[in-house]
Structures are given as C-alpha cells and as structure tokens.
Image (cartoon, helix red, strand yellow):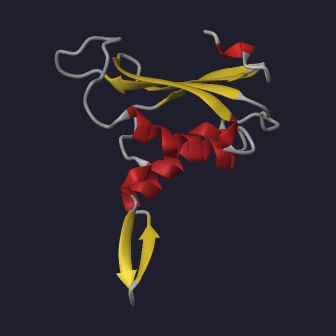
C-alpha cells in the first residue's frame, strides 16, 4: 500500500531548510526562519495538504521524490539538473512539511529515500510513498 501524486508548481521552491538564520540576544543564540523560508514552507504545506492521507502511514516507508524544474535555456525535458539547490537540502523541508501534515507519524519511518531532480516541460514535485515489509524484503527495487 502507498500513494503517488504530483504537485504542480510553476516554480519549484529552491529555498531549503538550511537557510535558517541565527541572531544572538544577550549571548544566547536564537534561531529563526527568514521570510523566504516561511513562504516556501507555507506554499509546500498548502499544496501537500491536498494529498495528505486520511490516516498517517506506519511502519517502514520508501519515499521517492522527483523534482521537476521548469525547463529553460538549452535544457531538454528529462535532463538531469546538476545546479543548485542540492537534492538532500531540499528534502528536509519537504519531509518536515509532510510530517506536520500527517503523512506519517514521524519521518523516522522513512527508511528508504530516492530523490532526483530534472529539467521538465511540466514543473512540480512527483512524490511516491510506499509501505515496505517489516523484514526488509521490500527494499529491492
């Protein structure tokens, strides 16, 4: 069991979780999210909310995320995107939003993670979540 869906986005967010900021107040570091990160989180929460399951998924899960960036310049549909942002940095914010929305109880259940980024004619984020076998036999593609 699992789910597959596509979140159409004219501009795939490039803002990442690592863009949090810190300021020091009386010698105490205070972390905060700049406005761009807040807007990106809000956009992802709004668009992912349309796809959240009725009940959180449990047990080991495989998360497959394909980032489809709007094709520009001489790039062709389906060509790997080798420029920033880094795939691993984009995933943290996405997983945090999915956890908050109740796709799963905790992102520790994501035991397998596959992510790629491409230039595409149709921009957005393709997401597949698959429940895996407890014994690990579901880990073979």
Taking the view exactly as shown, the residue that stands out farthest to the right is: 55
User: 96 or 134: nearer the eye?
Assistant: 134
Task: Out of 68 and 20, give the one closest to the viewer.
Answer: 20
Q: Quadrant location of the N terminus?
A: top right
Q: Residue 81, percent across and down?
A: 30, 23
- The residue drawn where x is 22% and y is 15% is 75
On screen, residue 88 versus residue 86, left or right, reads right
Counting from the top left corner in percent of width and height, residue 125 is at 49, 27
- Which residue lies at the image location 27% right of the left edge and 25% below the top edge? 82
Whole-percent x, y for residue 20 in the image: 40, 60
Q: Nearer the viewer, residue 61 or 1?
A: 61
Locate residue 132 relative to residue 36 in the image: left or right. right
The vertical placement of 123 against 51, above or below, is: above
Instruction: Count up the numbered dots.
Output: 0
The location of residue 22, given as percent across then percent down, is 37, 70
Quadrant occupied by the C terminus: top right
Determine whether 17 is above or below 87 in the image.
Answer: below
Residue extending farthest left: 74
Residue at the extreme bottom of the image, as rendered = 26
Residue at 50% in and 46% down: 93
Q: Residue 21 sits in which quadrant?
A: bottom left
Which is more toward the observer, 110 or 45? 110
């Amino acid at each position: 069991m699992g789910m597959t869906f596509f979140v159409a986005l004219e501009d795939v967010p490039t803002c990442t979780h690592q863009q949090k900021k810190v300021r020091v107040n009386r010698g105490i570091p205070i972390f905060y999210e700049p406005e761009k990160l807040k807007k990106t989180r809000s956009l992802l929460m709004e668009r992912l909310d349309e796809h959240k399951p009725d009940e959180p998924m449990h047990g080991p899960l495989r998360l497959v995320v394909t980032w489809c960036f709007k094709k520009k310049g001489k790039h062709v549909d389906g060509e790997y995107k080798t420029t920033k942002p880094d795939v691993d940095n984009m995933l943290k914010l996405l997983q945090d939003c999915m956890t908050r929305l109740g796709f799963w109880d905790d992102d520790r259940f994501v035991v397998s993670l596959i992510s790629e980024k491409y230039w595409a004619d149709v921009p957005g984020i393709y997401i597949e979540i698959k429940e895996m076998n407890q014994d690990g036999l579901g880990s073979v593609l």
